[in-house]
């Protein structure tokens, strides 16, 4: 499915969020910089076409790996980010081709809700992350409240209709809403991360 919508993925993401998705990615880098986090080796997991990968390069790592299961997304990323520090690898999050305790930071931008085997993937992420390393997740979680209900009307009705039409997919943008609607709340997700051996530093809810 992600191979199918790869050519229009960036354009539609920016359109549907009014470029707010770009601001969220920049905020990750800003927060890390303000905390004087200076990672030497980064993994951007479920990286898609590399929007977050490009932002992470501003942290001046020695090396950044970008990984996704979609070959078409990664091919677009190779063309978009011609940086010698970047290595693009097609891999599943539950079976990563890296040695133990290798990365200073692992990021996942709008991808973890698509992981088929979440506990296995979290265990694999913990394996390749250094003990003092950081896992940074940017995601849309299931939530309640008036703002969230209004967002769901837009995200569940308007966006799939337009997105499927513009991407020429019969179901991709319907799936994207369903993947959020059936995903975990922030609280439940944090509990799963606790079980996987992670410790929460902080979380921010926008809805």
Image (tube, rainbow, N blue to C red):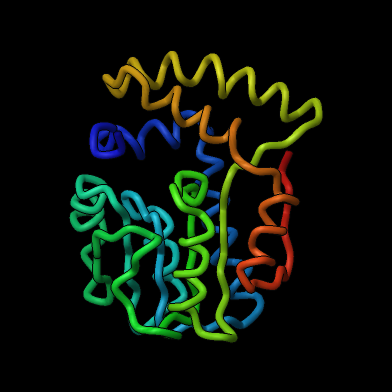
Left or right of 99? Residue 128 is: right
Left or right of 73? Residue 196 is: right
Left or right of 142? Residue 15 is: left
Which of the 4 image quarters holds residue 102? bottom left
Q: Residue, x 72% and y 70% (percent of image)?
A: 201
Placement of 17 over or under 78, stated as above or below: above
**Which quarter of the rendering shows the C terminus?**
top right
**Which quarter of the rendering shows the N terminus?**
top left
Placement of 200 over or under 153, stated as above or below: below
Q: Residue, x 40% and y 22% (percent of image)?
A: 163
Nearer to us in this view, 176 or 161:
176
Q: Residue, x 39% and y 53% (percent of image)?
A: 51
Which of the 4 image quarters holds residue 144? top right
Placement of 56 over or under 5, stated as above or below: below
Report x, y in % for residue 172.
37, 27
Nearer to us in this view, 196 or 56:
196
Report x, y in % for residue 190.
70, 58
Which of the 4 image quarters holds residue 52? bottom left
- Total labels drawn: 0
Left or right of 30? Residue 103 is: left
Q: Residue, x 74% and y 65% (percent of image)?
A: 202
Placement of 176 over or under 128, stated as above or below: above
Report x, y in % for residue 38.
52, 84
Outermost residue, right direction?
Answer: 145
Report x, y in % for residue 81.
26, 60
């Amino acid at each position: 499915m992600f191979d199918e919508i790869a050519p229009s993925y960036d354009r539609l993401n920016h359109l549907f969020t009014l470029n707010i998705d770009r601001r969220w990615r920049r905020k990750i880098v800003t927060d890390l910089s303000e905390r004087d986090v200076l990672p030497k080796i980064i993994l951007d997991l479920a990286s898609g076409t590399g929007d977050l990968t490009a932002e992470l390069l501003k942290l001046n790592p020695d090396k950044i790996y970008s990984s996704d299961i979609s070959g078409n997304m990664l091919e677009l990323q190779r063309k978009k980010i011609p940086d010698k520090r970047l290595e693009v690898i097609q891999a599943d999050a539950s079976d990563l081709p890296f040695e133990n305790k290798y990365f200073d930071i692992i990021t996942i931008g709008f991808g973890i809700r698509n992981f088929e085997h979440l506990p296995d993937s979290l265990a694999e992420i913990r394996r390749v992350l250094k003990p003092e390393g950081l896992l940074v997740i940017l995601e849309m979680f299931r939530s309640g409240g008036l703002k969230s209900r209004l967002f769901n009307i837009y995200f569940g009705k308007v966006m799939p209709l337009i997105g499927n039409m513009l991407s020429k997919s019969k179901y991709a943008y319907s799936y994207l809403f369903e993947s959020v609607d059936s995903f975990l709340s922030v609280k439940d997700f944090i509990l799963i991360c606790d079980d996987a051996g992670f410790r929460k530093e902080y979380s921010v809810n926008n809805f």
